[in-house]
Protein backbone atom coordinates (compact mmCIF):
# COMPACT_ATOMS: atom_id res chain seq x y z
CA UNK A 1 0.00 0.00 0.00
CA UNK A 2 0.91 3.67 -0.32
CA UNK A 3 1.07 5.96 2.66
CA UNK A 4 2.35 9.31 3.81
CA UNK A 5 4.45 9.25 6.94
CA UNK A 6 5.10 12.12 9.33
CA UNK A 7 8.57 11.88 10.82
CA UNK A 8 9.68 13.68 14.00
CA UNK A 9 12.91 14.16 15.93
CA UNK A 10 15.74 11.95 14.76
CA UNK A 11 13.49 10.09 12.28
CA UNK A 12 12.96 13.35 10.41
CA UNK A 13 16.74 13.47 9.87
CA UNK A 14 16.93 9.77 8.92
CA UNK A 15 14.04 9.90 6.44
CA UNK A 16 15.17 13.27 5.12
CA UNK A 17 11.94 15.17 5.69
CA UNK A 18 8.96 15.94 7.88
CA UNK A 19 6.53 14.14 5.52
CA UNK A 20 7.58 11.23 3.31
CA UNK A 21 5.55 9.25 0.77
CA UNK A 22 6.19 5.56 1.12
CA UNK A 23 5.13 2.40 -0.68
CA UNK A 24 5.30 -1.00 0.94
CA UNK A 25 4.12 -4.60 0.89
CA UNK A 26 1.30 -5.36 3.33
CA UNK A 27 -1.08 -3.11 5.26
CA UNK A 28 -0.17 -3.55 8.91
CA UNK A 29 1.89 -1.36 11.20
CA UNK A 30 4.37 -4.26 11.47
CA UNK A 31 4.72 -4.34 7.67
CA UNK A 32 5.51 -0.62 7.71
CA UNK A 33 8.09 -1.17 10.46
CA UNK A 34 9.80 -3.91 8.39
CA UNK A 35 9.76 -1.79 5.25
CA UNK A 36 11.29 1.16 7.13
CA UNK A 37 14.03 -1.07 8.57
CA UNK A 38 14.83 -2.25 5.02
CA UNK A 39 14.96 1.16 3.46
CA UNK A 40 16.40 3.16 6.42
CA UNK A 41 18.60 0.71 8.37
CA UNK A 42 19.71 3.52 10.71
CA UNK A 43 16.27 3.27 12.34
CA UNK A 44 17.40 -0.01 13.91
CA UNK A 45 19.97 1.91 15.96
CA UNK A 46 17.28 3.85 17.83
CA UNK A 47 16.40 3.04 21.43
CA UNK A 48 12.80 2.53 20.33
CA UNK A 49 10.39 3.38 17.55
CA UNK A 50 6.67 3.66 18.09
CA UNK A 51 4.24 4.20 15.26
CA UNK A 52 1.15 6.36 15.82
CA UNK A 53 -2.01 6.07 13.74
CA UNK A 54 -4.51 8.93 13.91
CA UNK A 55 -2.85 10.37 17.02
CA UNK A 56 -2.76 7.08 18.97
CA UNK A 57 0.08 4.68 19.60
CA UNK A 58 -0.60 1.55 17.48
CA UNK A 59 0.83 -1.94 17.80
CA UNK A 60 2.28 -3.96 14.95
CA UNK A 61 -0.97 -5.86 14.27
CA UNK A 62 -2.92 -2.65 13.64
CA UNK A 63 -4.39 -2.45 10.09
CA UNK A 64 -3.61 0.69 8.09
CA UNK A 65 -5.84 2.60 5.67
CA UNK A 66 -4.52 4.94 3.02
CA UNK A 67 -6.30 7.87 4.68
CA UNK A 68 -4.75 7.26 8.12
CA UNK A 69 -2.44 9.84 9.62
CA UNK A 70 0.72 7.83 10.29
CA UNK A 71 3.61 9.17 12.36
CA UNK A 72 6.99 7.85 13.49
CA UNK A 73 7.64 8.38 17.21
CA UNK A 74 11.31 7.91 18.10
CA UNK A 75 12.24 8.04 21.83
CA UNK A 76 10.45 11.05 23.28
CA UNK A 77 12.35 13.62 25.36
CA UNK A 78 9.93 16.36 26.33
CA UNK A 79 10.04 18.25 29.59
CA UNK B 1 -5.62 24.06 29.94
CA UNK B 2 -3.15 22.14 27.80
CA UNK B 3 -0.89 24.31 25.71
CA UNK B 4 1.99 23.66 23.31
CA UNK B 5 3.51 27.02 22.54
CA UNK B 6 6.47 28.73 20.90
CA UNK B 7 6.13 31.68 23.26
CA UNK B 8 7.78 32.04 26.68
CA UNK B 9 5.59 30.41 29.33
CA UNK B 10 4.01 32.70 31.93
CA UNK B 11 4.38 30.50 35.04
CA UNK B 12 2.04 32.62 37.18
CA UNK B 13 -0.68 32.31 34.54
CA UNK B 14 -0.37 28.51 34.51
CA UNK B 15 -0.63 28.50 38.33
CA UNK B 16 -3.66 30.80 38.25
CA UNK B 17 -5.38 28.53 35.72
CA UNK B 18 -4.85 25.50 37.97
CA UNK B 19 -5.95 27.21 41.19
CA UNK B 20 -9.33 26.74 42.83
CA UNK B 21 -11.02 28.36 45.82
CA UNK B 22 -11.82 24.96 47.31
CA UNK B 23 -8.21 23.82 47.12
CA UNK B 24 -5.78 24.18 49.99
CA UNK B 25 -2.79 22.97 48.01
CA UNK B 26 -1.22 23.79 44.67
CA UNK B 27 1.83 21.93 43.41
CA UNK B 28 3.83 23.20 40.49
CA UNK B 29 6.64 21.55 38.55
CA UNK B 30 8.81 23.72 36.32
CA UNK B 31 11.27 22.06 33.96
CA UNK B 32 14.04 24.41 32.89
CA UNK B 33 16.90 24.13 30.41
CA UNK B 34 20.14 23.26 32.18
CA UNK B 35 23.36 24.89 31.08
CA UNK B 36 25.25 21.58 30.90
CA UNK B 37 24.62 18.03 29.64
CA UNK B 38 27.17 15.18 29.32
CA UNK B 39 29.70 17.54 30.97
CA UNK B 40 29.40 19.91 27.99
CA UNK B 41 27.97 23.42 27.77
CA UNK B 42 24.51 23.57 26.24
CA UNK B 43 24.27 26.51 23.83
CA UNK B 44 20.59 26.02 23.16
CA UNK B 45 17.88 23.38 22.83
CA UNK B 46 15.48 22.75 19.98
CA UNK B 47 12.09 21.32 20.99
CA UNK B 48 9.58 19.95 18.54
CA UNK B 49 6.18 18.34 19.10
CA UNK B 50 3.63 16.30 17.19
CA UNK B 51 1.16 18.81 18.52
CA UNK B 52 -2.28 17.24 18.10
CA UNK B 53 -1.10 13.91 19.50
CA UNK B 54 0.88 15.57 22.29
CA UNK B 55 -2.25 17.38 23.45
CA UNK B 56 -4.24 14.12 23.27
CA UNK B 57 -1.62 12.15 25.26
CA UNK B 58 -1.30 14.87 27.90
CA UNK B 59 -5.09 14.95 28.23
CA UNK B 60 -5.17 11.18 28.92
CA UNK B 61 -2.52 11.56 31.62
CA UNK B 62 -4.39 14.45 33.25
CA UNK B 63 -7.72 12.61 33.16
CA UNK B 64 -6.10 9.66 34.96
CA UNK B 65 -4.53 11.92 37.58
CA UNK B 66 -7.66 14.02 38.09
CA UNK B 67 -9.75 10.89 38.73
CA UNK B 68 -7.16 9.20 40.99
CA UNK B 69 -6.32 12.20 43.21
CA UNK B 70 -9.53 14.26 42.99
CA UNK B 71 -7.89 17.30 41.43
CA UNK B 72 -9.78 20.58 41.61
CA UNK B 73 -7.76 22.27 38.87
CA UNK B 74 -4.83 21.66 36.55
CA UNK B 75 -2.84 23.19 33.71
CA UNK B 76 0.06 22.01 31.56
CA UNK B 77 2.09 24.21 29.25
CA UNK B 78 4.99 22.93 27.13
CA UNK B 79 7.25 25.16 25.10
CA UNK B 80 8.63 24.26 21.65
CA UNK B 81 11.20 25.94 19.41
CA UNK B 82 14.58 27.30 20.47
CA UNK B 83 15.28 27.56 24.21
CA UNK B 84 18.34 28.90 25.98
CA UNK B 85 19.67 27.69 29.37
CA UNK B 86 17.50 28.93 32.23
CA UNK B 87 14.36 29.15 30.11
CA UNK B 88 11.20 27.30 31.11
CA UNK B 89 10.43 24.24 28.95
CA UNK B 90 7.41 22.84 30.78
CA UNK B 91 5.08 23.79 33.62
CA UNK B 92 2.63 21.43 35.32
CA UNK B 93 0.34 22.88 37.99
CA UNK B 94 -2.41 21.07 39.92
CA UNK B 95 -4.63 21.99 42.83
CA UNK B 96 -6.14 19.58 45.33
CA UNK B 97 -7.79 19.78 48.75
CA UNK B 98 -4.66 18.41 50.48
CA UNK B 99 -0.95 18.67 49.84
CA UNK B 100 -0.06 14.99 49.51
CA UNK B 101 -2.49 14.58 46.61
CA UNK B 102 -1.12 17.70 44.94
CA UNK B 103 2.46 16.36 45.06
CA UNK B 104 1.55 12.84 43.92
CA UNK B 105 -0.65 14.05 41.05
CA UNK B 106 1.86 16.61 39.80
CA UNK B 107 4.67 14.05 39.83
CA UNK B 108 2.49 11.48 38.05
CA UNK B 109 1.61 14.00 35.36
CA UNK B 110 5.16 15.19 34.63
CA UNK B 111 6.54 11.63 34.74
CA UNK B 112 3.94 10.42 32.25
CA UNK B 113 4.01 13.50 30.04
CA UNK B 114 7.75 12.99 29.70
CA UNK B 115 7.30 9.29 28.95
CA UNK B 116 4.34 9.48 26.56
CA UNK B 117 3.87 12.88 24.95
CA UNK B 118 5.41 12.99 21.44
CA UNK B 119 7.82 15.85 22.11
CA UNK B 120 11.53 15.79 21.30
CA UNK B 121 14.50 17.90 22.20
CA UNK B 122 17.85 18.29 20.49
CA UNK B 123 20.79 19.57 22.53
CA UNK B 124 23.05 21.94 20.64
CA UNK B 125 26.61 22.08 21.98
CA UNK B 126 29.52 24.21 20.81
CA UNK B 127 30.87 21.23 18.84
CA UNK B 128 27.78 19.40 17.66
CA UNK B 129 24.18 18.47 18.38
CA UNK B 130 22.24 15.43 19.52
CA UNK B 131 18.61 14.27 19.79
CA UNK B 132 18.21 13.46 23.49
CA UNK B 133 17.86 9.76 24.42
CA UNK B 134 17.39 8.74 20.78
CA UNK B 135 20.23 6.22 20.64
CA UNK B 136 21.63 3.75 23.17
CA UNK B 137 25.10 5.30 23.16
CA UNK B 138 23.87 8.56 24.59
CA UNK B 139 24.43 8.81 28.35
CA UNK B 140 21.12 8.40 30.11
CA UNK B 141 20.00 11.61 31.75
CA UNK B 142 16.84 13.27 32.80
CA UNK B 143 15.48 16.30 34.57
CA UNK C 1 15.39 33.26 51.48
CA UNK C 2 13.17 32.65 54.49
CA UNK C 3 10.48 35.24 54.96
CA UNK C 4 7.61 35.71 57.42
CA UNK C 5 5.53 38.56 56.08
CA UNK C 6 2.25 40.41 56.54
CA UNK C 7 2.22 41.34 52.85
CA UNK C 8 0.74 39.29 50.01
CA UNK C 9 3.31 36.76 48.75
CA UNK C 10 4.63 37.25 45.21
CA UNK C 11 4.80 33.60 44.06
CA UNK C 12 6.89 34.35 40.98
CA UNK C 13 9.47 36.12 43.11
CA UNK C 14 9.77 33.13 45.44
CA UNK C 15 10.24 30.87 42.39
CA UNK C 16 12.87 33.19 40.90
CA UNK C 17 14.77 33.24 44.20
CA UNK C 18 14.86 29.42 44.26
CA UNK C 19 15.84 29.00 40.61
CA UNK C 20 19.35 28.19 39.40
CA UNK C 21 20.92 27.94 35.95
CA UNK C 22 22.35 24.51 36.76
CA UNK C 23 18.95 23.15 37.79
CA UNK C 24 16.65 21.30 35.42
CA UNK C 25 13.79 21.07 37.90
CA UNK C 26 11.93 23.46 40.15
CA UNK C 27 9.17 22.26 42.45
CA UNK C 28 6.82 24.70 44.12
CA UNK C 29 4.22 24.13 46.81
CA UNK C 30 1.61 26.81 47.40
CA UNK C 31 -0.67 26.54 50.42
CA UNK C 32 -3.84 28.57 50.01
CA UNK C 33 -6.75 29.37 52.31
CA UNK C 34 -9.69 27.09 51.62
CA UNK C 35 -13.21 28.49 51.69
CA UNK C 36 -14.53 25.70 53.94
CA UNK C 37 -13.41 23.80 57.06
CA UNK C 38 -15.47 21.35 59.16
CA UNK C 39 -18.23 21.81 56.55
CA UNK C 40 -18.51 25.48 57.48
CA UNK C 41 -17.69 28.58 55.46
CA UNK C 42 -14.40 30.19 56.42
CA UNK C 43 -14.78 33.98 56.51
CA UNK C 44 -11.10 34.63 57.14
CA UNK C 45 -8.02 33.18 58.86
CA UNK C 46 -5.71 34.81 61.37
CA UNK C 47 -2.09 33.63 61.23
CA UNK C 48 0.47 34.46 63.88
CA UNK C 49 4.11 33.42 64.22
CA UNK C 50 6.84 33.40 66.83
CA UNK C 51 8.96 34.95 64.12
CA UNK C 52 12.58 34.54 65.22
CA UNK C 53 12.03 30.92 66.18
CA UNK C 54 9.96 30.20 63.05
CA UNK C 55 12.81 31.41 60.85
CA UNK C 56 15.29 29.31 62.85
CA UNK C 57 13.15 26.15 62.61
CA UNK C 58 12.53 26.62 58.89
CA UNK C 59 16.27 27.10 58.38
CA UNK C 60 17.01 23.76 60.09
CA UNK C 61 14.49 22.00 57.85
CA UNK C 62 15.94 23.57 54.70
CA UNK C 63 19.52 22.74 55.70
CA UNK C 64 18.51 19.09 56.14
CA UNK C 65 16.74 19.00 52.77
CA UNK C 66 19.51 20.86 50.93
CA UNK C 67 22.11 18.36 52.19
CA UNK C 68 19.97 15.28 51.56
CA UNK C 69 18.78 16.15 48.03
CA UNK C 70 21.59 18.39 46.78
CA UNK C 71 19.37 21.44 46.27
CA UNK C 72 20.72 24.19 44.05
CA UNK C 73 18.32 26.84 45.32
CA UNK C 74 15.38 27.28 47.69
CA UNK C 75 13.01 29.86 49.14
CA UNK C 76 10.23 29.76 51.74
CA UNK C 77 7.75 32.54 52.36
CA UNK C 78 4.98 32.36 54.98
CA UNK C 79 2.28 34.95 55.38
CA UNK C 80 0.88 36.09 58.74
CA UNK C 81 -2.04 38.34 59.65
CA UNK C 82 -5.53 38.22 58.19
CA UNK C 83 -6.04 36.04 55.07
CA UNK C 84 -9.21 35.53 53.04
CA UNK C 85 -10.12 32.33 51.15
CA UNK C 86 -8.02 31.93 48.01
CA UNK C 87 -5.08 33.90 49.39
CA UNK C 88 -1.63 32.34 49.52
CA UNK C 89 -0.49 31.39 53.04
CA UNK C 90 2.82 29.69 52.26
CA UNK C 91 5.11 29.09 49.29
CA UNK C 92 8.01 26.63 49.23
CA UNK C 93 10.18 26.52 46.09
CA UNK C 94 13.29 24.39 45.50
CA UNK C 95 15.49 23.72 42.50
CA UNK C 96 17.51 20.57 41.89
CA UNK C 97 19.29 18.94 38.96
CA UNK C 98 16.53 16.31 38.60
CA UNK C 99 12.81 16.31 39.13
CA UNK C 100 12.50 13.49 41.68
CA UNK C 101 14.80 15.31 44.10
CA UNK C 102 12.84 18.53 43.62
CA UNK C 103 9.54 16.82 44.52
CA UNK C 104 10.96 14.91 47.50
CA UNK C 105 12.77 17.94 48.93
CA UNK C 106 9.80 20.28 48.52
CA UNK C 107 7.46 17.81 50.19
CA UNK C 108 9.92 17.23 53.05
CA UNK C 109 10.22 20.96 53.62
CA UNK C 110 6.50 21.76 53.68
CA UNK C 111 5.72 18.69 55.83
CA UNK C 112 8.34 19.68 58.40
CA UNK C 113 7.64 23.40 58.30
CA UNK C 114 4.01 22.59 59.09
CA UNK C 115 5.04 20.21 61.89
CA UNK C 116 7.78 22.28 63.52
CA UNK C 117 7.61 25.99 62.73
CA UNK C 118 5.86 27.94 65.53
CA UNK C 119 3.08 29.38 63.41
CA UNK C 120 -0.61 29.22 64.29
CA UNK C 121 -3.84 29.85 62.49
CA UNK C 122 -7.29 30.64 63.79
CA UNK C 123 -10.27 29.93 61.56
CA UNK C 124 -12.99 32.54 61.76
CA UNK C 125 -16.47 31.28 60.80
CA UNK C 126 -19.73 33.15 60.61
CA UNK C 127 -20.69 31.80 64.05
CA UNK C 128 -17.39 31.61 65.91
CA UNK C 129 -13.67 31.03 65.72
CA UNK C 130 -11.20 28.26 66.54
CA UNK C 131 -7.41 27.80 66.81
CA UNK C 132 -6.71 24.99 64.35
CA UNK C 133 -5.70 21.60 65.80
CA UNK C 134 -5.27 23.08 69.29
CA UNK C 135 -7.65 20.73 71.07
CA UNK C 136 -8.49 17.05 70.65
CA UNK C 137 -12.17 17.70 69.87
CA UNK C 138 -11.40 19.61 66.68
CA UNK C 139 -11.75 17.43 63.59
CA UNK C 140 -8.32 16.61 62.25
CA UNK C 141 -7.69 18.32 58.97
CA UNK C 142 -4.78 19.45 56.92
CA UNK C 143 -3.82 20.99 53.62
CA UNK D 1 12.16 31.66 90.17
CA UNK D 2 10.64 34.57 88.25
CA UNK D 3 10.28 34.50 84.52
CA UNK D 4 8.54 36.22 81.64
CA UNK D 5 6.63 33.94 79.29
CA UNK D 6 5.67 34.63 75.71
CA UNK D 7 2.36 32.99 74.83
CA UNK D 8 1.14 32.27 71.28
CA UNK D 9 -1.99 30.97 69.65
CA UNK D 10 -4.49 29.50 72.06
CA UNK D 11 -2.10 29.90 75.02
CA UNK D 12 -2.23 33.67 74.53
CA UNK D 13 -6.00 33.46 75.08
CA UNK D 14 -5.63 31.12 78.08
CA UNK D 15 -2.93 33.18 79.84
CA UNK D 16 -4.66 36.43 78.93
CA UNK D 17 -1.79 38.09 77.12
CA UNK D 18 1.17 37.86 74.78
CA UNK D 19 3.72 38.28 77.61
CA UNK D 20 3.03 37.18 81.16
CA UNK D 21 5.22 37.49 84.26
CA UNK D 22 5.21 34.29 86.25
CA UNK D 23 6.68 33.11 89.53
CA UNK D 24 7.14 29.44 90.33
CA UNK D 25 8.93 26.86 92.48
CA UNK D 26 11.97 25.25 90.84
CA UNK D 27 14.02 26.24 87.80
CA UNK D 28 13.43 23.54 85.19
CA UNK D 29 11.14 23.52 82.16
CA UNK D 30 9.19 20.69 83.83
CA UNK D 31 8.66 22.87 86.91
CA UNK D 32 7.27 25.62 84.70
CA UNK D 33 4.97 23.12 82.98
CA UNK D 34 3.61 21.95 86.38
CA UNK D 35 3.13 25.50 87.59
CA UNK D 36 1.24 26.41 84.41
CA UNK D 37 -1.01 23.35 84.76
CA UNK D 38 -1.79 24.45 88.33
CA UNK D 39 -2.57 28.04 87.51
CA UNK D 40 -4.17 27.57 84.04
CA UNK D 41 -5.84 24.11 84.09
CA UNK D 42 -7.23 24.72 80.59
CA UNK D 43 -3.71 24.09 79.25
CA UNK D 44 -4.19 20.40 80.06
CA UNK D 45 -6.94 20.25 77.41
CA UNK D 46 -4.51 21.06 74.58
CA UNK D 47 -3.31 18.40 72.15
CA UNK D 48 0.26 19.25 73.15
CA UNK D 49 2.32 22.00 74.72
CA UNK D 50 5.99 22.49 73.91
CA UNK D 51 8.14 25.03 75.71
CA UNK D 52 10.85 26.87 73.79
CA UNK D 53 13.90 28.42 75.45
CA UNK D 54 15.91 30.96 73.45
CA UNK D 55 14.19 29.91 70.19
CA UNK D 56 14.75 26.16 70.62
CA UNK D 57 12.38 23.44 71.73
CA UNK D 58 13.46 22.41 75.26
CA UNK D 59 12.64 19.27 77.21
CA UNK D 60 11.39 19.17 80.79
CA UNK D 61 14.87 18.63 82.30
CA UNK D 62 16.23 21.84 80.73
CA UNK D 63 17.45 24.37 83.36
CA UNK D 64 16.06 27.89 83.10
CA UNK D 65 17.81 31.21 83.75
CA UNK D 66 15.97 34.43 84.53
CA UNK D 67 17.32 36.01 81.34
CA UNK D 68 16.10 33.19 79.05
CA UNK D 69 13.46 33.93 76.42
CA UNK D 70 10.74 31.42 77.28
CA UNK D 71 7.77 30.74 74.97
CA UNK D 72 4.73 28.49 75.06
CA UNK D 73 4.21 26.55 71.81
CA UNK D 74 0.71 25.04 71.59
CA UNK D 75 -0.03 22.73 68.59
CA UNK D 76 1.34 24.51 65.52
CA UNK D 77 -0.84 24.93 62.43
CA UNK D 78 1.15 26.89 59.85
CA UNK D 79 0.91 26.40 56.13
Image (cartoon, coloured by chain):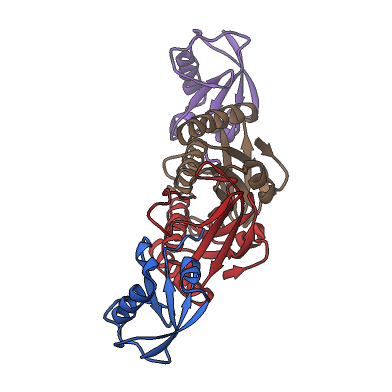
Chain colours: A blue, B red, C brown, D purple
Q: Position of residue D10 (x, y in %)?
A: 56, 35
Relative to C1, is C111 on the left or the right?
left
Toward which corner of the image does residue A37 lie, by quadrant? bottom left
Q: Is residue C126 visible?
A: no
Residue placed farthest to the right in the image?
A: C7
Q: Position of residue C96 (x, y in %)?
A: 53, 42
Relative to A4, is D53 on the left or the right?
right
Residue located 60% across and 65% down the image: B80
**Is C110 or B65 nearer to us in this picture?**
B65
Residue located 40% across and 92% down the image: A66
**Is C131 or C92 nearer to us in this picture?**
C92
Residue located 71% across and 42% down the image: C6
Relative to B70, is C57 on the left or the right?
right
Residue A26 higher or lower than C140, as above or below: below
Q: Quadrant location of the N terminus of chain B?
A: bottom right
Residue B4 higher or lower than B143, as above or below: below
Q: Position of residue C143 (x, y in %)?
A: 49, 50
Q: Is residue D66 visible?
A: yes
Q: Position of residue B91 (x, y in %)?
A: 57, 58
Relative to A47, is C85 on the left or the right?
right
**Is A62 or B39 nearer to us in this picture?**
B39
**Is C137 or B51 nearer to us in this picture?**
B51
Count the marks. Answer: 0
Residue B94 higher or lower than A6, as above or below: above
Residue C116 higher or lower than B29, as above or below: above
Amino acid sequence: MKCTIKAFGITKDILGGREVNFEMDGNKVGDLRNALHGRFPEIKSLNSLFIAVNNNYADDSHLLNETDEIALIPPVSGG
Amino acid sequence: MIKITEKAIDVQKVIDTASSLGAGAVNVFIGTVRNTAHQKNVVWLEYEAYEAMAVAEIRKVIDEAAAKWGLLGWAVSHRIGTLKPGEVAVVVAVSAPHRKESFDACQYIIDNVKAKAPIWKKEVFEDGEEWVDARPMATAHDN
